Image: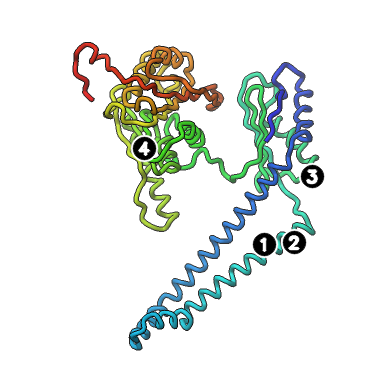
Amino acid sequence: MGLNPRTPGSRPEPKEEVLKDFEELAGKLPWSDPLKVWKINTNFKKKKTKRKKINQNTGKEKINNGQGDKIDETDGKKGFTNNTLDSHILDYYENPAIKEEISTLVGDDLASYKDEKDESSKEETHPKMLKFRVTCNRAGEKHCFSSNEAARDFGGAVQDYFKWKADMTNFDVEVLLNIHDSEIVVGIALTEESLHRRNITHFGPTTLRSTLAYGMLRLCAPQPTDIIVDPMCGTGAIPIEGATEWSNCYHIAGDNNPLAVDRAANNISSLLTKSQIKEGEVSWGLPIDAVQWDICNLPLRTGTVDIIVTDMPFGKRMGSKKRNWNLYPACLREMSRVCRPGTGRAALLTQDKKCFTKALSGMGHVWRKVHTVWVNIGGLHAAVYLLKRTPQAFVHPSEQDGERTPW
């Protein structure tokens, strides 16, 4: 919602002054537009819940009247006439079950409209006392305050400004206070639960947030029929997010660790089961496959992949910084082989920026850096590098020596 040019605590100051800055911040922010969006979103969710209840009630009535419908059909067959169209029209108007269903639907819609009208009139005459809480997410080492202290003082100022009631569990509005080094962003949550774990049920040691996975994919602007590969998929967060949001593309999840491939397969299976329960019908599946392979020797033909999106090992929880000096150049070389020259693109996430920059400097003939997006991964300052594949054809080192390439 608002970006403060100077974050409280970004330079050495007494703690009391910093917390006072938080109190003053609440009255300086442009709250009106974000609160309008929050209200529209809240009303939409209420209507959606009501519609769901109406559909459930209608479904129950259909089940209860099912036997009666069968009896009417049997009776109708006895008096079957040559004019089938007339008989269908008569059934429509004379069948008591159909009449009851129609009247129920109309009645529910009118009742829903009446409830909404009553609620809006009540809000106009007696405005509801909103309950809120402040959630602070903080990253950085130079702050002289804790996350709880920032949330407490900022929350107190918000309470004084709006006259809202503070409630940590049963709240209407959740104000988000995100602090990263010298920046602060204030927002209002539109979802009850965080979306960063959506679609993932089997977690690994370095499972990527689904929200970040979506952002990386979106950077590459996937087009229909694109082949999208994550050669180091881990639990499959990136390809699963891709298959969910870009179902007109084909996604391949691969990893050299059999445990990671199993987790990815289990996550895909869980997502299929979830979608079948939600839709109430058999799903045709997702455009995704999970494969075990070697990142430095991918079983893919040269120039056949449109997009590569992956979370590379940081060298902390997985691998090591020392191994990255050999791994990163080999990965970039193999990625350049399978990626389509001229149109291919890649979004690569890493915290080992020094090693990646060095590896990329030796690949200027096949990869061109387009953009760098800085991200915070659990307090680590990482980067997403958006790369474009150059038109130059890939030449394998073994071809230069007169040997035959395997692909």
Q: CA distance from mark 1 to mark 4?
A: 44 Å
Q: CA distance from mark 4 to mark 3?
A: 50 Å
- What sort of colour scheme is used for the picture? rainbow
Residue identifier under label 3: 163
Q: Residues within 10 Å of mark 2 (few under 14, many from 20)?
A: few
Residue identifier under label 1: 116
Which amino acid, mark 4?
Answer: His
Which amino acid, mark 2?
Answer: Ser
| 4 or 3: mark nearer the eye | 4
Residue identifier under label 2: 121
Question: Between disc 3 and disc 2, whose residue precedes?
Answer: 2
Q: Is disc 3 in contact with disc 2, using a CB cutoff of under 8 Å? A: no
Residue depicted at 52% across the width and 77% down the height: 100
Q: Is disc 2 in contact with disc 1, using a CB cutoff of under 8 Å? A: no
| 3 or 2: mark nearer the eye | 2
Which amino acid, mark 3?
Answer: Lys
Residue 342 placement, left or right of 126: left
Question: Between disc 2 and disc 4, whose residue precedes?
Answer: 2
Residue 115 x/y as whole percent: 67, 64
Which amino acid, mark 1?
Answer: Glu
Q: Nearer the viewer, residue 149 or 372?
A: 372
Name the outermost residue toward the bottom.
Answer: 79
Residue identifier under label 4: 251
Q: Nearer the viewer, residue 18 or 306?
A: 306
Q: Mark 2 falls on what kind of element?
A: helix
